[in-house]
Image (cartoon, grey):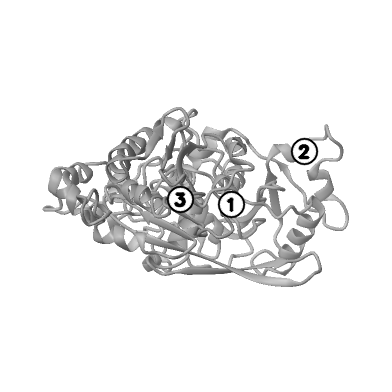
Amino acid sequence: MTMNKPIVWRPQPKQVQFLRRTEYEALYGGAAGGGKSDALLAEALYQVDIPQYKALILRKTFPQLKELIDRSLQLYKAAFPRARYNATEHTWHFPSGAQIIFGSMQRTEDRIKYQGQRYDFIAFDELTHFTWDEYSYMFSRNRPSRGPSNGRKTHVYMRAATNPGGIGHAWVKARFIDAAPPMTPIVDDVQIEGPDGSLQTVQRSRIFVPATVFDNQILLHDDPNYIGALGMLPEAERQALLYGSWDSFSGQVFREWKNDPEHYKDHLWTHVIDPFPIPKSWKIWRGFDWGYTKPFSVGWYAADPDGKIYRIREYYGCTDQPNTGVQMNAAEIARNIREIETQDPMLKGHDIIGVADPAIFEESRGESIAAIMAKHPNYVIWHPGDHHRLAGKNQYHYRFAFDQNGECLFQVFNTCRHFIRTIPSLVYDSKHVEDIDTDGEDHIYDECRYVLMEAPISPRAAVIPESPMGDPLNQYRRNTPWR
């Protein structure tokens, strides 16, 4: 804005921190009311004086874009009176020739709409509504637009804002939240092999800039009741939207999940524990969910004499990219399973019962996966698991429930990091509302479900500690088990 014009919009301190970041990727927010949408709209304006500049702002569905577009009509028109918005194209056209485009990607296949396009700046609003495949595909569309050879070059980068929850919760949490503390740059070295075999290293950086309603003093001044509205939400929504918790969020399937390192040793009020030696008398199951382009999952489970089940080891066929398989064939997976079972002291010498997705016994396209894995020299044997989805999901709930002593009937060794990463992040399907969304990273969930259905239990009452008096926002329960 020039000095002789009124100030249309002034960023607040947390928004300033976000707008000043120089990393290739930056995620802003993590709670409601932090000024995320304004920050993305402002960021998109930085290069509109460059004629060839093109920006793309994405929401999952087009109706969700309405609020963003309405806000842009307020901000952009006031800041750039000669700019024009084309409602048919959903595009702002600026006097320089620059464009800011609003788009959507309701289904993963919709990304084809952007094939062949190039955008200097790409922003995702509510990033957790997108899958990793959808987000990562847009890396290929994020490249400089062509302009005059003697003109200014554009700066190419990506930005996003979000609240916790949604189908992409797990991968967003892993990529931005768990990878480093907030405001800490994360730098990846990517090696590229040229046609001549030479290697070059390219660095890509990203960062998470947290913000909550407490960082939005303008909102709190204009609507003092807003914080109270967030405080009155149910437990999961309150923790996510008011405090920015990534461990509790709307749509979460297993809200009873508890991972408390202070109880890893005593095994109370936690589903994650320290490993311990498995007695030779205990029953051992091996679960399996096949995957090739998507991850495969193998998990080993021990049952004590009282019927409590422990996940003691895992073998997960995933690349360093979320929900992406290693494309390993069945014989190779079987060979690695046999090696694990002959070398791991917890498994060596045990009779192991293998239970797997019934689909691996399919022979309509030739020899089945189960038959291949059972061959010499691996002899990895499976029987079909019970595929009743809702019954299997309920077995998780029954076993996750804590009794009055803080004990439950399912726990996982803290070495099973992919189970710990993916199970708490599963969300409900928007159409089949009692089941999980299978577009998420559900391979470990399925594999474990087959094992739990081998020893089903009846529903159990869950205990929730009472909150102390004088705790209107129920913050005490932020550190206590949820039913």
Q: Tell which circle, 3 or 1, labels the residue nearer the N-terminal end.
A: 1
From the top left corner, tell me how far across and down residue 310 is, in percent.
Answer: 54, 56
Give the CA separation, mark 1 to mark 2.
53 Å
Whole-angstrom CA distance, mark 3 to mark 2, is 30 Å
Q: Residues within 10 Å of mark 1 (few under 14, many from 20)?
A: few
Per the image, label 1 sits on a secondary structure element best described as: loop
Indicate left or right for 245 with 222 as reference: right
For image coordinates 12% across by 52% down, the residue present is: 469
**Residue 96, image x and y in percent?**
43, 47
Indicate whether 334 appears above or below 431. below
Label 2: few (<14), some (14–19) or many (≥20) C-alpha neighbours in 10 Å: some
Asked if one can make out residue 58 in the rendered structure from this viewpoint, the answer is no
Whichever of callouts 3 and 2 sits on the residue coming sooner in the sequence is: 2
Q: Which residue is mark 1?
A: 146
Q: What amino acid is labelled 1 in the image? A: Arg
Q: Is residue 339 above or below residue 290?
A: below
Mark-to-mark CA distance, 3 and 1? 44 Å
Residue under label 3:
424
